[in-house]
């Protein structure tokens, strides 16, 4: 499918926590009508087997090999909820992004996308077909956006060694040093009650109980003092 799309592919996935099938009928209708007017093939990570009104250029599936899709040179755009890992993977593979944030952390990630100049944000609450189509075409056709994504990708890839080489080196390092005990976390050798801060929590509870006990007794003492002297003062006044 990726090789056979003459104008490129748009990949849309809202992640595992947000279901595309849970979008309102109106929102789905706007997406489908917009996609039908685009010259691109759309891969939509959709949880149901059927999507009423789906145009011919939209392909749905419950699962796509996302990493393989990101690596394909024919991908033009990634539409995402703004999850950190998905955003980083897209940027790593030179793909601009349109963010649809659903949560606070996603909102900050999408703001970072905008500030970095690698994509745009759309809001489902104010979504219209014209604005969605405009955003998609703008991100795909903007050479500055593509150039900025490439720049950030090159920055992330400019490392002294690859991730695989780093994993191999550290594995051999641990073997050479017979388990590398000097790198063991001290937390592995402390009792569980200390690891889970049970002693600290217990101390705080004791302090609260003692403070409460002292406060209650002070209040009782003050009330007794008032009761003891108040009748005498009334008698003297009479």
Image (cartoon, grey):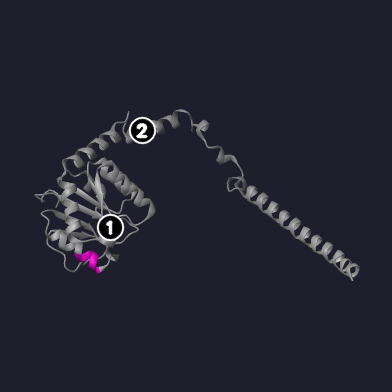
> x, y percentage for residue 85?
33, 47
Q: Does the magenta stretch include residue 3?
A: no
Q: Which of 167 and 135 is in front in this view?
A: 135
The image's mark for residue 71 is: none
The image's mark for residue 166 is: 2
> The residue tagged with tag 1: helix, strand or loop?
loop
| Residue that appears at 16% across and 41% down | 143
> x, y percentage for residue 229?
86, 64
| Residue that appears at 17% across and 49% down | 138
> x, y percentage for residue 93?
24, 41
| Residue that appears at 38% across and 51% down | 105
> The residue tagged with tag 2: helix, strand or loop?
helix
Q: Nearer the viewer, residue 107 or 174?
A: 107
Give the left or right position of residue 211, taking residue 20 as reference.
Answer: right
| Magenta range | 25-29
Q: Nearer the viewer, residue 124 or 31?
A: 124
């Amino acid at each position: 499918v990726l090789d056979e799309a003459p104008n490129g592919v748009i990949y849309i996935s809202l992640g595992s926590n947000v279901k595309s099938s849970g979008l309102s009928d109106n929102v789905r209708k706007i997406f489908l009508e917009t996609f039908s007017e685009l010259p691109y093939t759309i891969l939509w990570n959709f949880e149901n087997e059927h999507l009423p009104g789906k145009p011919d250029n939209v392909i749905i599936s419950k699962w796509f090999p996302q990493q393989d899709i990101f690596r394909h040179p024919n991908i033009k755009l990634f539409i995402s909820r703004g999850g950190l890992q998905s955003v980083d993977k897209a940027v790593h593979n030179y793909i601009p992004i349109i963010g649809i944030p659903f949560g606070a952390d996603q909102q900050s990630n999408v703001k970072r996308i905008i500030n970095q100049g690698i994509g745009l944000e759309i809001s489902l609450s104010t979504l219209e077909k014209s604005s969605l189509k405009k955003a998609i075409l703008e991100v795909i056709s903007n050479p500055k956006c593509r150039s900025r994504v490439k720049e950030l990708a090159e920055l992330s890839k400019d490392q002294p060694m690859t991730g695989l080489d780093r994993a191999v080196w550290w594995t051999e390092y641990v073997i050479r040093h017979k388990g590398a005990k000097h790198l063991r976390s001290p937390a592995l050798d402390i009792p569980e009650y200390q690891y889970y801060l049970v002693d600290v929590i217990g101390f705080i509870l004791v302090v609260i109980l003692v403070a409460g006990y002292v406060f209650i007794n002070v209040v009782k003492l003050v009330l007794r003092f008032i009761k003891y002297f108040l009748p005498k003062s009334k008698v003297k006044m009479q």
